[in-house]
């Protein structure tokens, strides 16, 4: 996919916001507790490398990614901090993980055995660093019982090609006010920890929501994701303990402005018809950029005015109704502040009946990212 540099639509990332969010979170953590910046999925659409740089400036001491390639991207950009891959990877790619000094998650016995078999056949100088994932109620990846975890530890201890670096779990309801299930998960993790012969270098349980809203005493590192980008992990449910600073702005410009007479159809399917003579503007962004069709009826900001998206969202363009004539090239804000008004990623998510995580991830790779302090 090429990046459309020659189009006025762009994402502006305010790296200072990322740095500040990391700093503010670290200031709340107990002395010595580390923050790993979660930069999977191209830094939730913000750019993995630039986000990682901004996070380090704020005090992050490691990174979490979702797959091997994302880890390699960070190494190739020159980062030498610990990097944890939050998933299992195909075992025949493990030599790459060792070469790039990436820690990998192990979540079941079969994978662990396959990994050891592969590495015994393709011996490298260094052992593979592993974090054991414990499934305490997410039902995704991870060892279920304390016995399975203890057996995995024994297996790693007895292997010359594996090294035990960490243990962790993931909470499924940390973004809700009701702590009942969260506490059950915590207890299950504690039960597992109690059975272990010793603890590895990293013990970690907190995603953003746990870090923000739960008094989490377990662990010496947090996996800080969505809140680092300035987004409230709970959506509307819980109030942020300190103001999170949104990092992402989505802007464009009007490439056509015209006065249409009453009764003109706008867009595919003629779903909007002008009710009177109206000023209609066209903006070069569409569903191919992740600005999806269900954003018809939502608004964008022009000169501080909310302007409705009228007619269907096209693949590459949208039309809006303007309050009056404005010059070609006038700035349009789709996410972010414009004069006194603001459209948040949460509002876009609400209109799309989804969560802001999804909005951030689907903003297309076609849109250039520009980085500002
Ligand atoms: C994505 C992810 C995180 C970060 O979650 P946020 O809600 O964005 O903070 C932490 N841990 C794991 C295992 C993840 O997959």
Image (spheres, rainbow, N blue to C red):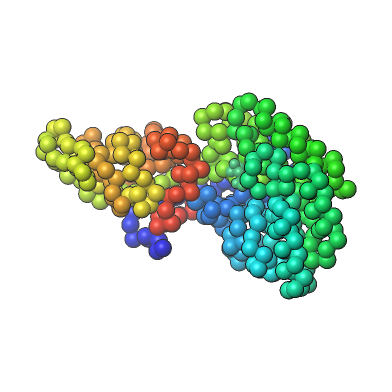
For the residue pair 15 and 283, the one nearer the viewer reads as 283
* Image coords of residue 146 (percent x, y): 80, 43
* Image coords of residue 293 (percent x, y): 33, 44
* Image coords of residue 223 (percent x, y): 66, 45
- Is residue 224 visible in the rendered structure shown here? no
Q: Quadrant of the N terminus?
A: bottom left
**In the shown orientation, is residue 275 left or right of residue 223?**
left
Measured along the vertical axis of the image, is residue 195 above or below residue 323? Answer: below
Q: Residue at x 19, y 41 (%)?
A: 270
**In the shown orientation, is residue 196 left or right of residue 14?**
right
* Image coords of residue 317 (percent x, y): 28, 50
For the residue pair 193 and 342, the one nearer the viewer reads as 193
**In the shown orientation, is residue 263 left or right of residue 325?**
left
For the residue pair 355 and 243, the one nearer the viewer reads as 355
- Report the number of discs: 0
- Is residue 146 visible in the rendered structure shown here? yes
Q: Quadrant of residue 205?
A: top right
Q: Residue at x 41, y 41 (%)?
A: 335
Measured along the vertical axis of the image, is residue 165 above or below residue 145? Answer: below
Q: Quadrant of residue 79?
A: bottom right
Q: Residue at x 43, y 50 (%)?
A: 363
Q: Residue at x 61, y 66 (%)?
A: 76
Residue extending furthest toward the front? 110
Residue extending furthest toward the right? 197
For the residue pair 314 and 303, the one nearer the viewer reads as 314
**In the shown orientation, is residue 195 left or right of residue 216?**
right
């Amino acid at each position: 996919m090429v990046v459309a540099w020659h189009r006025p639509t762009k994402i502006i990332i305010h790296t200072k916001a990322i740095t500040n969010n990391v700093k503010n979170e670290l200031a709340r953590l107990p002395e010595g507790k580390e923050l790993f910046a979660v930069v999977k999925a191209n830094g939730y659409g913000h750019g993995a490398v630039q986000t990682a740089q901004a996070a380090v400036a704020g005090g992050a001491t490691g990174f979490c990614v979702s797959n091997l390639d994302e880890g390699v991207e960070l190494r190739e950009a020159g980062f030498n901090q610990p990097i944890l891959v939050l998933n299992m990877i195909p075992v025949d790619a493990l030599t790459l993980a060792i070469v790039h000094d990436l820690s990998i998650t192990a979540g079941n016995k079969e994978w662990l055995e396959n990994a050891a078999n592969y590495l015994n056949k393709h011996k490298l100088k260094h052992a593979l660093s592993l974090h054991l994932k414990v499934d305490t109620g997410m039902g995704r990846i991870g060892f279920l019982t304390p016995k399975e975890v203890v057996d995995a530890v024994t297996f790693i201890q007895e292997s010359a090609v594996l090294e035990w670096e960490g243990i962790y779990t993931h909470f499924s309801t940390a973004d809700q006010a009701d702590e009942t299930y969260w506490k059950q998960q915590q207890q299950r993790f504690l039960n597992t920890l109690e059975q272990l012969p010793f603890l590895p270098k990293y013990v970690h349980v907190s995603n953003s929501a746990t870090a923000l809203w739960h008094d989490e005493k377990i662990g010496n590192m947090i996996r800080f994701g969505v809140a680092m980008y300035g987004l409230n992990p709970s959506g509307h449910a819980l109030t942020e303990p300190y103001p999170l600073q949104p990092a992402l702005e989505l802007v464009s410009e009007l490439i056509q402005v015209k006065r249409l007479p009453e009764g003109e159809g706008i867009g595919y399917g003629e779903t909007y018809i002008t009710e009177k003579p109206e000023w209609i503007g066209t903006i070069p962004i569409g569903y191919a950029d992740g600005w999806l069709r269900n954003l018809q009826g939502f608004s964008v900001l022009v000169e501080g005015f909310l302007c409705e998206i009228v007619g269907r969202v096209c693949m590459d363009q949208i039309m809006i109704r303007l309050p009056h004539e404005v010059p070609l090239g006038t700035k349009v804000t789709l996410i972010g502040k414009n004069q006194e008004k603001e459209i948040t990623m949460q509002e876009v998510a609400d209109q799309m009946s989804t969560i802001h995580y999804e909005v951030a991830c689907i903003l297309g790779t076609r849109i250039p990212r520009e980085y500002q302090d």
